[in-house]
Image (cartoon, coloured by chain):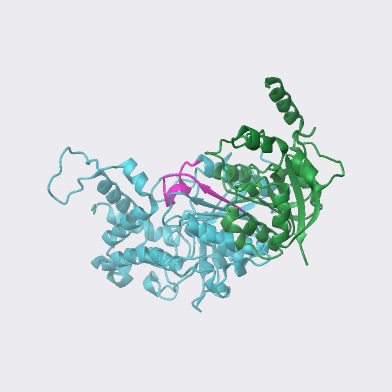
Chain colours: A green, B cyan
Amino acid sequence: MLTRIKQDLTMAEAARSPGGARIDLLVVADMVEPGARVLDVGCGDGELLRLLETRGVDGRGIELSREGVNECVAKGLAVVQGDADTDLENYPDDGFDFVILSQTLQATRRPRVVLEHMLRIGRHAIVSFPNFGHWRIRMQIGLGGHMPHTDNLPYAWYETPNIHFCSIKDFRQLCQVSGAKIEAAVVLNAWGRRMRLKMPWWFWNLFSEQAVFLLSRRG
Amino acid sequence: MAEASATLDFADRRREADQPHSLVVRFPASNPLRLDCGVDLGPLQIAYQTYGALNAERSNAVLVCHALTGDQHVVNDHPVTGKPGWWETMVGPGRPIDTTRYFVICPNVVGGCMGSSGPASTNPASGVPWGLDFPVITVRDMVRAQAMLLDHIGIESLFAVAGGSMGGMQVLQWAASYPARVFAALPIAASTRHTAQNIAFHEVGRQAVMADPDWRGGRYFAEGTDPRRGLAVARMAAHITYLSDAAMHRKFGRRFQDRDNPTFSFDADFQVESYLRHQGIAFVERFDANSYLYLTRAMDYFDLAGDYNGVAANAFRATPTRFCVISFTSDWLFPTSESRAVVHALNAAGARVSFAEITTDKGHDAFLLEEPELFTTVRGFLDGAAAARGLQPAAR
């Protein structure tokens, strides 16, 4: 068991690209057209925004934590302190080409409202999230009988900021009801590597730990 | 309150209003300042200080806008009080607004009393101080006068405009009035409008001044009186609004001043009373009572949204300026909610905006104090903007 954990950790380390950026962020960044106007909702310490700025993207961010915001502003990034649940309504329609929600959907109070605002504010929305349908999570709940712990989801249930978990299957259903069209999807395995196999959704839902969706407004 | 040295201060203040210890530009009556109240103010005098050097491209100028009771003496000793400049924590060599890198200009606002035309200046038509004959001015008038000064110096485009409180209002007005002339804007502890509570506090201050029998309907210079008591009380009341409950309690608590027991009198038993009295006395040494009326009025009238059909975002429509809005957690005079409203307006206008709320218990005055988080934020914002503007990094 210990060997297994060690192996996982090594692989997770390796999931950083040679440049040092997290692979899931690179996947998100690759979906953004050069020169686009981007709003990164829940931008953390600004790692993605910095990556995007090196690609000539005009990036803005919203971040809940004061430390994160101050770190971003000190780096010269255009980031405001704010809450995805309450502040997106202040942004005008079509103000951005891409609105990104990276590893934050599960921590919002009203994921559907947030997604709908993203599709209103941007021509495209990019959402990345941990897949709760992964087989190890299913095993931990189904056989272990406890809330799952993984490298991506390290919190105990009583102190996790993540209150709205979903599987890839659940997210596709949310897209359905929110009027989002799925333009592209990339799934990552347990080690943050891109899974390139052409497979049906149920396979991805079972074997991918993270998913990145590129969405647009339907109709 | 102390009566000593009243005549000396009085003469100093009068002289400083007309012949200040500053650089001065005088605009003739043929080139007046068109005021919001409809009056053309001319001749017009603007007193200002500069620090650092303007580069060959004239692209590194930073305009610092002072607050209600501030002046142009940002980082030099004050000519009347001899005290250090009011923003030495923020401006200077190696400071966030680095004078080895930027050319810093700070003018005294029109309506002020440190050398720019104001109620304490001599009215050229009558040869005596303007007093209440001086026209009522607005924040927009202050900014228009600053634009005239920059035209005179030959600075078309500012790298940045920065200021706190009333200075922050001027920053927002600059961005609204002259968007093409402002590359980066840094409004600190500011808002797009004065709230009813803000106006109420100012009205208390003005009534204190006007209730002083020495005020004489504003003609105290002509009558040889000095409304020190009224202005000191105004300052005491205002000073409370600049601090937070927590900071006051930390600093003074219920401690007695130079005594162990209450005196059962109305002497300054408590340290906080003694402190406020000192603040009042120190203030009247350097400030003109009528100026206090005019500048508080200008702040009360400030309502950026009101000037743009009730929508603050319209003030910033298609703005090319990058903004960094900063508020303080314990500021209840210009609370974070007001700064957030500024940010929402800027977002709605599609502006490039950063917003940081700084954790501090020092209240509204925190922008003047030692706040490392504030300095890191300002430095980061200006460094990013300077890179975008193509300014050379500071020689460190």
Give the answer, above or below, for where A200 lies relative to A152: below
Write the start and end of the magenta stretch as one range.
Answer: B353-371
Q: Could one spot residue B47 in this view of the protein?
A: no
Q: Does the magenta stretch include residue B14?
A: no
Q: Point out residue B352 in the picture as x, y percentages from the top left corner.
A: 66, 56
Name, please, the residue furthest toward the front.
A143
A77 and A145: which is toward the camera? A145
Q: Is residue B34 left or right of residue B80?
A: right
Q: Point out residue B165 in the picture as x, y percentages from the top left corner.
A: 47, 57
Give the answer, above or below, for where B99 lies relative to A8: below
| Residue drawn at point x = 23 percent, y = 45 percent | B270
Name, please, the residue furthest toward the bottom.
B38
B163 and A152: which is toward the camera? A152
Q: Please state the total of marks drawn on the protein image.
A: 0
A124 and B259: which is toward the camera? A124
| Residue drawn at point x = 48 percent, y = 44 percent | B359
Which of the image's four quarters has the C terminus of chain B?
A: top right
| Residue drawn at point x = 47 percent, y = 53 percent | B21
Name, please, the residue furthest toward the right.
A198
Q: Point out residue B337 in the picture as x, y percentages from the top left corner.
A: 49, 58
Q: Could one spot residue B142 in this view of the protein?
A: yes
Q: Point out residue B183 in the picture as x, y percentages from the top left corner.
A: 66, 56
Q: Does the magenta stretch include residue B358?
A: yes
B341 and B387: which is toward the camera? B341
Name, please, the residue furthest toward the left.
B264
Q: In this view, does B253 lie to the left or right of B176?
A: left
Q: Is residue A135 left or right of residue B2?
A: right
